[in-house]
Structure formats: structure tokens, C-alpha cells
Amino acid sequence: LAKEKGKNNYQVFNTEMKTISLKRLTMENELRKAILQNELILHYQPQMDIISGNIVGFEALIRWSHPEKGMISPMDFIPFAEESGLIVPIGEWVLQEACRQNKLWQEQGYPHMTVSVNISTRQFLQPNLCAQVADVLKSTGLDSSYLELEITESSTMDVDYAIGVLLELKELGIKISIDDFGTGYSSLSYLKRFPIDKLKIDQSFVRDIMTDPNDAAIVASIIAMTRHMNLKVIAEGVETEEQLGFLHLNNCNEIQGYFFSRPLPAEQLEMMLQHHQQAAPTQQGD
Ligand code: C2E
Ligand code: MG
Ligand code: MG
Ligand code: MG
């Protein structure tokens, strides 16, 4: 009986595996096609400086506009793209497209903003990442100070390698931020060795700052720490005015979240830029 049961289990397992690998194969083929047929698009979510109220940057967020399935979230295909390696050509396209768009807006006379581009771990570990970034800056003509790369703590597992790559990237004049900060397990002793510019406080901490004293303490502490380390700090996932108030009170530099704006297609962000009053830059200490 045990033997028979074992056999059945094996067969069930086997069938499931086949279904999964078939799904993967289909997904991989569709994603390859998506790249060639321009089904991938970028939305842009503005980032606001809390003191001035100005839009100082925007994050490029990928979407897959599927002919039958409609808009597919990056959460549903980026992990797969990572696994299959397709993230490399996809990431290259994102970088190129985001820089092209930023340069275009600058040429059209919009206030200069920094574009943030997400770099997955697999991309970060590509030996030619730095050359690729340099090529994109050159071909788009975007000044390197207006490009920020968002990496996650999982890209920095090999600390010495990560520091090497980051130093090389910094030499180009671009900025580096740590995305989803606090959700990985990078140690604070390494953090101080990384040549980075900004921390992005993960939205899971921001969500409940008004109701959970622990989250409030964590967020306030991260902000205080960035000040002492001369880093900038942005809070992700800000959805309410109360959260903004808390972050303002605790001296957070910037916010990104639905309260200010959802990620928007390029034309809609343009409209927003046309209507958003950009205040004159405030002096520090005002
Ligand atoms: P992320 O980089 O942490 O991006 C922030 C995510 O939070 C975005 O989800 C954004 O739409 C969402 N968000 C922004 N404000 C709020 C808010 O107030 N409330 C809530 N609940 N959510 C908010 P999205 O666009 O679905 O992207 C999910 C993740 O997919 C990103 O997380 C990033 O890890 C990845 N991703 C997106 N685009 C790219 C890309 O071009 N390359 C790579 N490698 N990963 C990408
Ligand atoms: Mg990000
Ligand atoms: Mg994030
Ligand atoms: Mg995230």
C-alpha cells in the first residue's frame, strides 16, 4: 500500500511539474514575443520633495500590455524574467527608454528631474552593467546626475563585489538608492561601506505608521539614521495626508505614493507636470 501510494504521489508530482514547466515555457515564449512586439511599456510615478512640494524625480515602473490578458503587473512577470534571464534584455530596454524619456522632458522645458530605474539582482551581477549604463547615457544624451539606479539588499549579498560595482557606477556620476529598505537583511555595518545616495523606506513600514508604534519607530529611526549618514531618504507607499504629516515632522526628504500620484503613462505625467505648481527652490533651514 505504501509503495502504491508513493507511486501515485510521484505521478501527481510529475504531472504537476509538467504543467508548471509548460506554463513556464509558454510564459517565456510570450515574454520573448512581448519584447520584440513592443508590448512592454513604462509608467512613471512622481517623487515629491516634502519641503518644497516640487516633483524632483520619478520612478520608471514596467508593465506588460498583453494583447489578450490586458495590463500585466511587473509582480507577475519580473520574477519569471529574472529566472529565465530575460530580465537582461528587458532591463536594458527599461534603462534606455527611461533615460530617453527623461532627456526628452528636459529638452521640452520641463523642470529637470531624476529618473529612477529598478535594477534586478541578475542585472546587477552582469559584468557589463556599468558599460551598459555608460552607453545608454551617451546614446540618450542624459546627464548622469539625472539617473538613479535602485538596487535591493539582495544584490549586495557579496559585499565586496557589490562595493566594486557601485564604485564603478558612481564614477559615471549617477546616483544609487537602496529599494525596499528594511525588508532584506543587509547589516548596518555594510551599509556604511556602500557608496550610496539614498534609502527608499519600504512601503510595508509606511503603511501602518499611524496605527503601529513599532512601524512609526522604525520609520523615524531610519530617517534619523540617514541624516547622520548624509544620505537622502524617500518613503514609498504614502497613501494618506496623515502619513505625509508624520514623515514631514520626522524630516523625511521625499515621498512617493498614491497620496501624491499613482504611476502614470508618460502623457499623463506630462499633464501633471504642466499643472503642478513648481515652487521656487527653498533655502535649507527655512
Ligand atoms: P518597487 O520598485 O518597490 O516599486 C514600488 C511599487 O509600489 C510599484 O508597484 C508602485 O506602483 C507601488 N506603489 C507606489 N505607491 C504606492 C502606494 O501608495 N500604495 C501601494 N499599495 N503601492 C504603491 P509596481 O509598479 O507593481 O511594481 C512592483 C515591483 O516590480 C517594483 O517594486 C519592482 O520591484 C518591480 N519592477 C517594476 N518595474 C521594474 C523594472 O523595470 N525592472 C525591474 N527589475 N523591476 C521592476
Ligand atoms: Mg523601485
Ligand atoms: Mg520599493
Ligand atoms: Mg517593492
Image: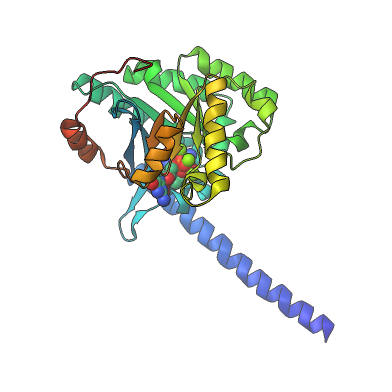
Question: In the figure, is residue 87 to the left or right of 273?
Answer: right
Q: Is residue 202 visible?
A: yes
Question: As rendered, which of 202 and 43 lies closer to the eye?
Answer: 202
Work out which residue is located at the far bottom of the displayed protein and give it: 1
Q: Is residue 95 visible?
A: no
Q: Is residue 117 above or below residue 78?
A: above
Which of the 4 image quarters holds residue 14? bottom right
Which residue occupies 68% across, 32% down? 187
Which of the 4 image quarters holds residue 248? top left
Question: As rendered, which of 277 and 174 lies closer to the eye?
Answer: 277
Q: Position of residue 133 (x, y in %)?
A: 45, 22
Question: In the figure, is residue 105 to the left or right of 187?
Answer: left
Q: Quick one: quadrant of the C terminus?
A: top left
Which residue occupies 59% across, 21% down? 165
Question: As rendered, which of 267 and 30 lies closer to the eye?
Answer: 267
Question: As rendered, which of 31 and 46 lies closer to the eye?
Answer: 46
Which residue occupies 54% across, 24% down? 128
Q: Quick one: quadrant of the N terminus?
A: bottom right
Q: Is residue 132 above or below residue 276?
A: above
Question: In the figure, is residue 222 to the left or right of 62?
Answer: right
Which of the 4 image quarters holds residue 18? bottom right
Q: Position of residue 85 (x, y in %)?
A: 54, 42
Question: In the figure, is residue 273 to the left or right of 7?
Answer: left
Q: Count every numbered label the image shows and give the total.
A: 0
Q: Position of residue 268 (x, y in %)?
A: 21, 40
Work out which residue is located at the far right of the displayed protein and give it: 2
Q: Position of residue 9 (x, y in %)?
A: 72, 76
